[in-house]
Image (cartoon, rainbow, N blue to C red):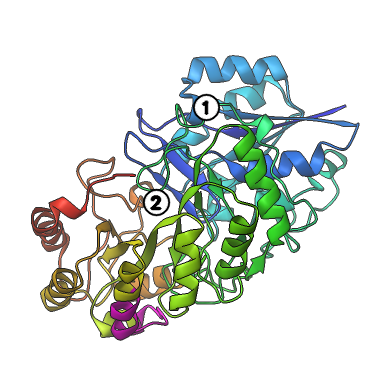
Amino acid sequence: MIKILLYNPPRYFNNPVVRLYRSEYVYSKIGVVPPMDFAYLCSALKGRDDIEIKILDSNGENLNLKKTKKNIKKFSPDIIVVKATVSTINHDLKLLEEYKNENKDVKIILSSRTCIGLESYILKNYQFLDGIARGEIDSFTDLPNILKNTEIKGLYTKSSPSQEIRVVEDLNINPIPDINELPNIWYTGYHIPPYCKSGYFLTASRGCFFKCTFCPTGGIKGTNFYLRKRNPINVIQELNILNSRGIKDFYFFDEIFTLPNHAEIISKKILEEKLDFIWRCEGKVNFINNNMLEIMKKAGCEMIFYGLESADNVNLNNVKKGQNLNQVRKAILLTKRNDIKVSLYIMLGLPNDSWKSFWKTFIFLLKSNPDSIRFNFLAPYPGTEIFEEMKARGLIDVNYANFDRHLSKENISNDITIRTEYLSEKELRLMEILFKKIFFYKLRDSV
Ligand code: SF4
């Protein structure tokens, strides 16, 4: 029997860490996201009678290192898949070196989107790792083969430094995540304002065809996190499971939920099945239309998050955002007209950011009046196109420990490692303070 442990490490100095597909960062004290990708991998491997698989979500259950170690020892795995973020990797990998020293045969595999591009650096610094899974961990269904030393597609090892990014090609082959393997802490442990109270992150599609240079989906060099959709029947089946567990709200974690022939179809199905949920999702301003929003509203959509990033077209073009300000204006109006709340993502510290671009964003927000604002500093992750740009322009200090994009004082890292062409670190911090003072009433994490 091969024992596989899917391990989400403890919180970072008491702060929950999001480690799920494209999202890897330290969150505020209240937000805890379940490792849904692990639940998918469980459902893919559980049918095999030679495998015993288990999720240890120390972040979700708020287990400390001592309890975590006890759990690992008790299960005594042959393979450990560990999640990490580029900013917290030292913390995330604690325990495992010691465990490997005590259990020489165990294979330890790292899974991290934000570590893409740093594989050789990581394997050099954490010699006890046996490999790094590049891509979506739930696509690595042949992971047990590592025990036979067989080469695994997308697995970067010292002897075989794969450059391939592996994804789940068909989301309908293994359609339902095995949430029985996750701790049953919906609402009580899992809970992530402003996205949903239950903490349930549901994906009806994955990937994106845009190429925003900062994005851990489209901005990864040579990316193949291409767009894939789930069969709506499978989405409904998952929703029925939620229903039976008393989960009444969730978040569509699709990179873009408002895709043509996607949002309408899923919403229609929810209505046909008479499912009573409240949900929120991410949208792209280019694609929405009145019919889509009307049916989304009827199906329970109460808020859409749009990425504005900056209200300066020079910035938007530079990061290949693939949208213009008119589209954003129209989307906000139309969404509000359909009685769906609007939240806008803003990114500070883009390479061409200046006081002028800040002013433009400030005016845009005042005029368009979104219901809430999600505001972050740019985190130029190593595998992204913007990382290369900032390095070439001398706008970044390459200190991976400080890469967390939540650089504000309420969070962990206070060290801004980025500058822009026109603003120093100090000016960026000042920009942040002003922004927060002006828009404090829009920044609340409500759900
Ligand atoms: S549209 Fe969104 S998901 Fe797609 S590449 Fe841009 S930021 Fe990433």
Write down the quadrant of residue 428 in the picture.
bottom left
- Residue 87's tag is none
**For mark 1, what is the residue?**
185
Q: Residues within 10 Å of mark 1 (few under 14, many from 20)?
A: some
Write down the residue under mark 2: 400
Locate residue 63, reporting x and y percent. Answer: 49, 21
Q: Is the CB of mark 2 within 8 Å of ligand 1?
A: no
Main SS of residues in magenta: helix
Q: Is residue 143 magenta?
A: no
Specify the segment rendered in magenta. Answer: 317-331
Ligand 1 has an atom within 8 Å of the beta carbon of the residue at disc 1 = no
Is residue 324 covered in magenta?
yes
Task: Identify which residue is drawn at 46% across, 28% down.
Answer: 189
- Work out how far the residue at label 2 is from the one at label 1, CA to CA, in angstroms: 32 Å
Q: In this view, does 297 lie to the left or right of 316?
A: right
Where's residue 300, x and y in %?
47, 54
Residue at 51% x, 77% y is: 210
The N terminus, quarter of image:
top right
